[in-house]
Amino acid sequence: AQSVTQLGSHVSVSEGALVLLRCNYSSSVPPYLFWYVQYPNQGLQLLLKYTTGATLVKGINGFEAEFKKSETSFHLTKPSAHMSDAAEYFCAVQGAQKLVFGQGTRLTINP
Amino acid sequence: EADIYQTPRYLVIGTGKKITLECSQTMGHDKMYWYQQDPGMELHLIHYSYGVNSTEKGDLSSESTVSRIRTEHFPLTLESARPSHTSQYLCASSDPSGARGDTQYFGPGTRLTVL
């Protein structure tokens, strides 16, 4: 069975600083991995996904993630945080018939 | 851009009322899903559907029911709402290809409060 662990339920960074949100997965098959973002009182929006091929995946809003099979990780990064990046971020792995989500990481940006 | 709609966005009702949360998508997706999400918490899958006349229960037990009479419409019903049903309900649909890695597109959610 597939599972996802997001390390850190809350992450706080200063505006302009590097953003790093951690995600580790468990999968019995080659994983398909996703990052979603949720702004307050809204649904989830896809940031990026990894299926096959290049392990460094670029997404929207300047985010990217790198698939590391040896570390079973899919961490999300952004070089320079903006105030508008404040939101909840969810990592997910494709299960047999559905997505399996992590518990989420709330990103706070300090001015 | 995905087009998936949920109504109402916010609902406050009294205990014992019957409610239906509406979800519609215009993308022709076969697969649709309902998630329950408490504030600041993870998502729990409560129902999903592979297509018309197909419904399945998800990972989290729920007293709600769903139906899928039309491809584009996947409503969720609570016959008798209780305060424990207070939560946010998110609807999603995914690409019709059936391949692994199909992206789920989410609606804006319905925030339900039962008094």
Image: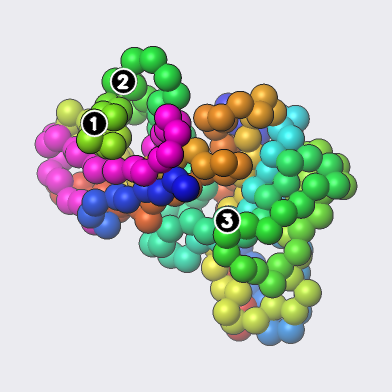
- The residue type indicated by label 2 comes to Thr
Between tags 2 and 1, which lies in front?
1
Q: Is residue A7 left or right of residue B15?
A: left
Circle 3 residue: B45
Query: Circles 2 and 3: CB distance less than 8 Å?
Result: no
Find numbered disc 2 in the image and state the secondary structure of the residue it sits on.
Answer: loop
Q: Residue at x 45, y 34 (%)?
A: A29
Instruction: Give coordinates of residue A35: x percent, y percent.
Output: 39, 37
Circle 2 residue: A55
Where on the picture, by quarter, is residue A30?
top left
Q: Residue at x 29, y 29 (%)?
A: A69
Give yes or no for residue A29 being in the magenta stretch: yes
Magenta region's main secondary structure?
A: strand
- The residue type indicated by label 3 comes to Leu
Mark 2 belongs to which subunit?
Answer: A
Instruction: Give coordinates of residue A70: x percent, y percent.
Output: 24, 31
Where on the picture, by quarter, is residue A64?
top left
Q: Is residue A99 left or right of residue A56?
A: right
Query: Circles 1 and 3: CB distance less than 8 Å?
Result: no
Circle 1 residue: A70
Mark 3 belongs to which subunit?
Answer: B
Q: Residue at x 49, y 56 (%)?
A: B43
- The residue type indicated by label 1 comes to Ser
Instruction: Give coordinates of residue A106: x percent, y percent.
Output: 30, 53
Question: Which region is colored magenta?
Answer: A10-36
- Give the CA distance from mark 2 to mark 1: 12 Å
Quadrant in the picture for the C terminus of chain B: bottom right
Q: What sort of colour scheme is used for the picture?
A: rainbow
Decide which of tag 2 and tag 1 comes sooner along the chain.
Answer: 2
Q: Nearer the viewer, residue B95 or B27?
A: B95
